[in-house]
Image (tube, rainbow, N blue to C red):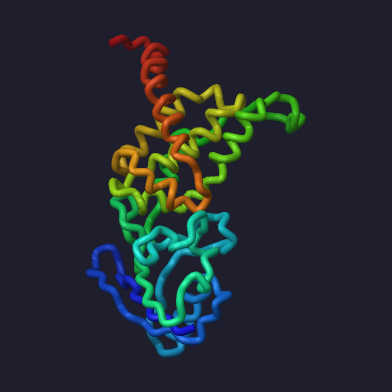
Amino acid sequence: MNITLQVWRQKGPNDRGKFVTYQVGGVSPEMSFLEMLDLLNERLIREGEEPVAFDHDCREGICGSCGVMIDGQAHGPQLGTATCQLHMRKFKDGATICVEPWRATGFPLVKDLVVDRSSFDHIIEAGGYITVDTGSAPDANLIPVPKEAADSAFDAAACIGCGACVAACPNGAANLFTAAKMSHLNLLPQGQAERWSRAQRMVDTMEEYFGSCTNHGECEKACPKSISIDFIAMMNADYVKAKFKNRRLTGQHT
């Protein structure tokens, strides 16, 4: 296959960026999209040019490191797929493909296709933990968990934190990510100790970096793990309850 790439190149956050066109030949249909970028970079290095910077790690759709806009779609044209799992057979020979980074205020650009997603880390730090007793590990079945709760928690925990939901959202909102990370703990018995403080802290931290959700639903469509926006409704309900419960706990009254 022969592919024409229009790649966003930007040396740093304070530099002007632009699209640069590259011709990439010898692309196998079985290559992943990242392997195709590797092929381009190998050629650029041989020619003494600066390779295209992009994030990657496990390349198995688990770590969430990869993620670019491909022809205006987060992770590309195949739904429920991370960029590293997208294969070139999804494109036609001779196709022109536009590749650019996530575009969101909460994800400041670092270089080329790389953005800083540490804002997600701050949301996790705000409440993504549970209180447990120290000592030896308890038996796996010591705390009974209803199957419905366990299944929903597993669905939420599938979030890999790639940021596609933010990139796809017209408002640059991170509600799907925050809801998933909050819900997989709030749904389980082990997560009840911090449930209400977690809900308030994580949402308040999210709002420092990202826009507001207006239920466009683009986040669910772009998510490589197809996480449901139902979790956003659950998060909003917990947040409203938390505002009342936390105020009561601190002795504040309206």
The residue shown at (41%, 70%) is 53
Residue 247's spot in the image, x, y percent? 36, 15
Q: For residue 163, say whether it is visible.
A: no
Dividing the picture into quadrants, the one containing residue 248 is: top left
Horizontal placement of 6 versus 92: left or right?
left
- Callout count: 0
Residue 222's spot in the image, x, y percent? 43, 52
Residue 134's spot in the image, x, y percent? 67, 29
Q: Is residue 71 depicted above or below 188 in this figure?
A: below
Q: Residue furthest front?
A: 92
Q: Is residue 103 depicted above or below 210 in this figure?
A: below
The residue shown at (45%, 76%) is 92
Dividing the picture into quadrants, the one containing residue 73 is: bottom left
Along the viewing direction, whichever of 29 and 188 lies nearer the viewer? 29
Along the viewing direction, whichever of 208 and 67 lies nearer the viewer? 67
Dividing the picture into quadrants, the one containing residue 199 is: top left
Q: Quadrant of the C terminus?
A: top left
The residue shown at (41%, 25%) is 237
Horizontal placement of 98 versus 39: left or right?
left
Q: Is residue 32 depicted above or below 252 in this figure?
A: below
The residue shown at (42%, 35%) is 232
Q: Is residue 216 depicted above or below 194 in this figure?
A: below
Q: For residue 75, say whether it is visible.
A: yes
Horizontal placement of 133 versus 88: left or right?
right
Horizontal placement of 111 versus 185: left or right?
left
Residue 121's spot in the image, x, y percent? 44, 45
